[in-house]
Image (cartoon, coloured by chain):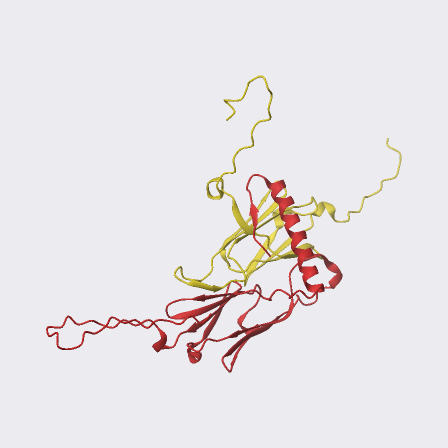
């Protein structure tokens, strides 16, 4: 799904554009799925890196904490769950159905510098956020530099732990 | 450019230059996925709006048009570097034309865990109504 341009004030044009975009997306998804051109990962998520941690963000509308299962096995993080359709609603009462439901899972290979024991997750407003703190020795550190009076001691070099790019 | 053209030659007016997105108020938005189903009371609409806080969801009914606008905020600090992206943060917008069947005064909305649930009750005038038949000659 791609964002589409909304032009306030030109509602009918915007509607047309949205409909076209929907149609194209739908057709493209269908072709992709049926020709096995590599299905889109589902649910989609983003991975961010901060100084002290990594963050995995997955939009999961309607998913609550008790319907989520997060496991770490051998440096592999797996998030899985199942989205149930509303109970006791006959299938033929739908006039339009665009929302997905069913089981899903995503797997992420953790970089070695993640402190596995400190991983935490939260769900708010339909967004899952998994925080993956870095190991303390992998976080940026500054080394204090003393203004020495004697030049006999070897000058300390200003060092900073340089992070390897774990992409 | 138009000033230098001969005046006798009628040329179509030049198309206005596309304005920058920010100045003209153009916004990139997602069209939220939604289900519409029938219930005994009327229609039920359910839409996925992940990342929208309840106070940032705006529902407006005006001239039988229902507008849903949700402002998205992700709990990601500004200094975060994006390593891998499959989804972009963008607000949600979608509008509908409601039929006269819907009683717009009694629309109810419930928003939980990023899912909006709107109940659109059927108007009383569309419910079956029995018409009494009078017999007898008017006097």
The picture places residue A132, in percent across and down from the top left corner, at 44, 73
Position of the N terminus of chain A by quadrant: bottom right
Image position of A146 with respect to B81: above or below:
below
The picture places residue A157, in percent across and down from the top left corner, at 23, 72
The colour one sees for chain A in the rendered image is red
The picture places residue A158, in percent across and down from the top left corner, at 24, 70
The picture places residue B49, in percent across and down from the top left corner, at 56, 58
The quadrant where residue B132 appears: top right
Q: Which of A113 and B104 is in front in this view?
A: A113
Q: How many marks?
A: 0
Q: Is residue B26 visible?
A: yes
Write down which chain is painted yellow: B
The residue at the far top in this view is: B8
Image position of A85 with respect to B4: above or below:
below
The residue under the point 51% across, 44% down is B26
Q: Is residue B37 visible?
A: no
Q: Nearer the viewer, residue A91 or A14?
A: A14
The residue at the far left in this view is: A149
The residue under the point 42% across, 70% down is A165
């Amino acid at each position: 799904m791609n964002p589409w341009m909304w032009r306030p004030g030109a509602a009918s044009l915007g509607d047309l554009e949205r409909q076209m975009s929907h149609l194209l997306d739908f057709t493209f998804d269908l072709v992709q799925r049926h020709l096995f051109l590599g299905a889109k990962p589902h649910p989609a998520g983003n991975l961010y890196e901060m100084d002290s941690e990594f963050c995995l963000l997955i939009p999961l509308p309607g998913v609550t904490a008790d319907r989520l299962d997060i496991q770490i096995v051998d440096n592999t993080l797996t998030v899985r769950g199942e989205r149930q359709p509303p109970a006791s609603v006959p299938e033929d009462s739908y006039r339009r159905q665009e929302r997905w439901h069913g089981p899903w899972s995503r797997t992420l290979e953790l970089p070695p510098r993640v402190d596995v024991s400190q991983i935490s997750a939260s769900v708010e407003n339909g967004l899952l956020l998994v925080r993956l703190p870095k190991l303390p020795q992998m976080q940026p550190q500054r080394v204090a530099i003393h203004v020495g009076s004697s030049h006999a001691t070897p000058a300390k070099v200003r060092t900073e732990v340089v992070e390897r790019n774990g992409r | 450019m138009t000033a230098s053209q001969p005046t006798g030659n009628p040329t179509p007016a030049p198309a206005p230059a596309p304005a920058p997105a920010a100045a003209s108020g153009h916004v990139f938005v997602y069209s939220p996925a939604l289900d519409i189903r029938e219930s005994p009371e009327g229609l039920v609409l359910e839409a996925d709006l992940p990342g929208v806080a309840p106070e940032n969801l705006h529902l407006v009914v005006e001239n039988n048009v229902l507008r849903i606008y949700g402002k998205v905020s992700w709990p990601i600090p500004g200094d975060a570097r994006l390593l891998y992206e499959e989804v972009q943060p963008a607000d949600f917008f979608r509008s509908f034309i409601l039929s006269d069947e819907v009683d717009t005064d009694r629309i109810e909305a419930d928003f939980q865990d990023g899912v909006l649930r709107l109940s659109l009750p059927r108007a009383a005038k569309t419910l079956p109504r029995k018409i009494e038949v009078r017999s007898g000659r008017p006097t």
